[in-house]
Image (spheres, coloured by chain):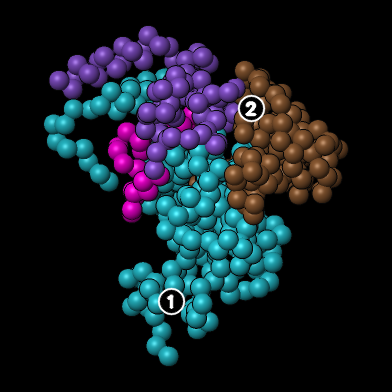
Amino acid sequence: MNGAHDLGGMHGLGPINAEPDEPVFHEEWERRMFGLFIATFAGGHFNVDQFRHAIERMNPAHYLESPYYEHWLHSCETLLVEAGAISRKELDARVAKLEKEAK
Amino acid sequence: MSVLKAEMVETLVKTGASCRVDAKVAPRFRCGERVVVRNINPLHHTRLPRYVRGKRGTVERDRGVFVFPDTNAHGHDHKPQHVYSVRFTGRELWGPQASERDVLYLDLWDDYMDPA
Amino acid sequence: MVHPRHNAPLSDTALRVKALESLLIEKGLIDPQALDALVDTYENKIGPHNGARVVARAWTDPAYKQRLLEDATLAIAELGYTGVQGEDMVVVENSPEVHNMVVCTLCSCYPWPTLGLPPNWYKSAPYRSRAVIDPRGVLHEFGVTVPDTTEVRVWDSNAELRYLVLPMRPEGTEEMSEDELAGLVTRDSMIGTGLPKTRAVGGPAKADSQRRRK
């Protein structure tokens, strides 16, 4: 699809700003998300092309503005819900529960 | 569906999951052949970037037979076909303002190209 | 392991990741210890030091270099670097005539077994958009100047081949051991956005103590 991910040749996206001595993961949630993707992929819930396409289906503004591993979160949530392994309702309920517990 | 256990991680990491397919599929193109990239604009998944569609290049290397992502993303049809490293000049892609010396290589499946 | 600041609220994203993980564990779909093992592998074990060994071997062993250029997957496997996101490798050689640079404009494809996980800049919009249309501008931003007479060759990894750049061996390194040479090979030099360290700069602090005296 002609999505926002198809970036080759676009202008105006800013300087590269390479971070010196960048850590492999910047946040704990990135570590967990990395592991979640590999585990669910290895578990056979989706293939790599489905995984990429689910990222391509993100809202374009969200895609461009979100940190990298948030793309993986979006894709895994989408595919696992579409596969019927989890439901949106369950996810939302669990987020609400965790939010409450954190207060 | 299976569950990845900790003791399986090392083997998984070292083995991976190649998308190469062991199938006898005839290539559509030969090395050195001039090709024109198809101007397709599918709503579905593709690995054909917009910037190369309709452009002319040269097939430089046949990389072998691989799963076709455009179909694999939407079902389980692997449609195995050849993938080639295809060379494009910067000027072909970006116009006369581009450096005359620089080139770009993309890996293109049989279904992405026609003979020029 | 980095611990979050005590009492710092979890961001929305962090909460969603936690929610997803906890649900999948409850449903018996994932094993959290497998996640721990995966994180440990890619955070602490696999990294560009692997690719540096491949490069150093190619610099010192012409027969190995030949094998590397003919069938990179097999040659890299000789050193034990195989697997996820490195199943189908291609090594591209820099020379005075050609400077290679690798990008994935569509997402973030990168040779994990030899380079580890990619840095943020490689996966972000500025590099992905500009590498193909203005490679010399990108190189300039990285502090690399390539002569006008050198062809800049950009490889967009849009399929499942994964590319590793074999940089040119720096001048005056004939006396260096393979280990010392590996210490000159930077991650960016294997992506094509950098050059190896030179003999004058020397290897990393770790190698200094091991440097043999003539």
Residue reaching furthest to the bottom: C214
Residue reaching furthest to the top: A89
- Residue drawn at point x = 25 percent, y = 26 percent: C11
Q: Is residue C50 visible?
A: no
- What's the magenta region? A16-40
- Chain B's colour is brown
- Give residue C111's mark: none
- Residue drawn at point x = 51 percent, y = 65 percent: C53
Disc 1 and disc 2 in contact, CB within 8 angstroms: no
Q: Secondary structure at mark 2?
A: loop
Amino acid residing under circle 1: Arg
Check the image and report above or below for C170 versus B81. Answer: below
Query: What is the tally of numbered marks visible in this picture?
Result: 2
Check the image and report above or below for A22 versus A30. Answer: below
Instruction: Identify the subunit bearing mark 1.
Output: C
The CA span between labels 1 and 2 is: 45 Å
Image check: C188 left or right of B97? left
Question: Magenta stretch: residue A38 in it?
Answer: yes
Image check: B66 left or right of C105? right
Residue B20 lies in quadrant: top right
Q: Is residue B87 visible?
A: yes
User: Which chain is rendered cyan in the image?
Assistant: C
Instruction: Identify the subunit bearing mark 2.
Output: B
- Chain A's colour is purple
| Figure quadrant of the N terminus of chain B | top right
Picture coordinates of residue B116, whole percent (x, y)? 82, 37
Amino acid residing under circle 2: Thr
What crowding class fits label 2: few (fewer than 14 Cα within 10 Å), some (14-19), or many (20 or more)?
Answer: many
Q: Which residue is mark 2?
A: B46
Q: Which residue is mark 1?
A: C199
